[in-house]
Image (cartoon, helix red, strand yellow):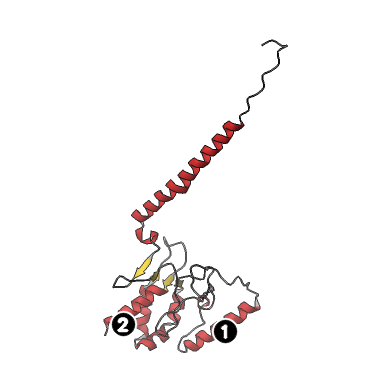
């Protein structure tokens, strides 16, 4: 090419870039939208089958009674009560969420005071202040756990309703306290559904 010849026009690579983008999209969808989820699901089912299935709880007959991860509503005096729930009509896993009320909200303050009064009335033999987790809802509304203090607070009511010694109920609660993960993460907690199942099983065994 001489100095007098015009430079060649650069080739239009629009089609090439378009095909590359389409191919990249297809590969990404297949790899990340199909292969990766299937592999992770398979690993979960193989190594953590119980958790991958939703941590279900079955009774002795094999019937599904709940999940370790989803709280349930208990109101009878012989059972441990969980946290209040603002999820749907209560503990609705399809409508999880809290009240979204701030600490200075009059509505929240009034609701908490009302809950404290109701809990004291239902637990006349309880000592000490009402644990706050028993009168405030969690962010999800389906928290399955309460604090050990929240469970111990209810021990006199449960013992009276079941005709048991308070110490027996407290020992059962102590046996169901879940420690912090690795000794560091989270707080001590008690799974309400599991403890109530243990209460029923223990009482049935003494009959």
* Residue that appears at 66% across and 19% down: 8
Image quadrant in which the C terminus is located:
bottom left
12 displayed left or right of 206: right
* Residue that appears at 58% across and 35% down: 18
Front in this rendered view, residue 123 or 167: 123
Residue 129 picture location, percent across and down: 52, 82
The quadrant holding residue 160 is: bottom left
Residue 22 picture location, percent across and down: 54, 39
- N-terminal of the two: label 2 or label 1? 1
Image quadrant in which the N terminus is located:
top right
- Tell which residue pokes out farthest to the top in this image: 2
Residue 25 picture location, percent across and down: 52, 41
Q: Which circle marks residue 126 in the picture?
A: none
For label 2, the SS is helix
Front in this rendered view, residue 175 or 44: 44
46 displayed left or right of 24: left
Residue 149 picture location, percent across and down: 46, 77
168 displayed left or right of 13: left
From the viewer's perspective, is residue 32 above or below residue 91? above
- Separation (CA) of disc 2 from disc 1: 32 Å
Residue that carries the numbered disc 2 in the rendered image: 203
* Residue that appears at 65% across and 75% down: 105
Residue that carries the numbered disc 1 in the rendered image: 114
From the viewer's perspective, is residue 146 above or below residue 127? above
From the viewer's perspective, is residue 30 above or below residue 206? above
The quadrant holding residue 195 is: bottom left
- Tell which residue pokes out farthest to the right in this image: 4
The quadrant holding residue 4 is: top right
For label 1, the SS is helix
* Residue that appears at 39% across and 59% down: 52
Query: Is disc 1 surrounded by few (<14), some (14 to 19) or many (20+) residues within 10 Å?
Result: few
Front in this rendered view, residue 39 or 134: 39
């Amino acid at each position: 090419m001489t100095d007098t010849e015009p430079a060649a026009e650069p080739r239009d690579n629009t089609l090439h870039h378009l095909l590359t983008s389409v191919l990249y999209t297809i590969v990404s969808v297949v790899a990340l939208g199909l292969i990766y989820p299937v592999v992770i699901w398979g690993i979960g089912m193989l190594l953590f089958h119980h958790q991958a299935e939703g941590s279900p709880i079955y009774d002795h007959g094999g019937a599904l009674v709940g999940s370790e991860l989803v709280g349930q509503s208990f109101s009878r005096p012989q059972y441990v009560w969980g946290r209040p729930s603002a999820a749907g009509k209560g503990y609705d896993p399809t409508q999880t969420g809290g009240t979204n009320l701030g600490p200075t909200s009059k509505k929240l303050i009034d609701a908490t005071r009302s809950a404290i009064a109701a809990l004291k009335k239902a637990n006349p033999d309880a000592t000490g202040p009402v644990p706050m987790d028993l009168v405030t809802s969690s962010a999800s509304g389906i928290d399955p756990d309460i604090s050990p203090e929240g469970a111990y607070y209810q021990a006199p009511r449960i013992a009276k309703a079941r005709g048991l010694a308070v110490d027996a109920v407290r020992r059962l609660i102590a046996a169901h306290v879940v420690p912090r993960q690795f000794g560091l993460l989270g707080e001590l907690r008690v799974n309400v559904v599991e403890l109530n199942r243990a209460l029923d099983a223990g009482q049935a065994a003494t009959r």
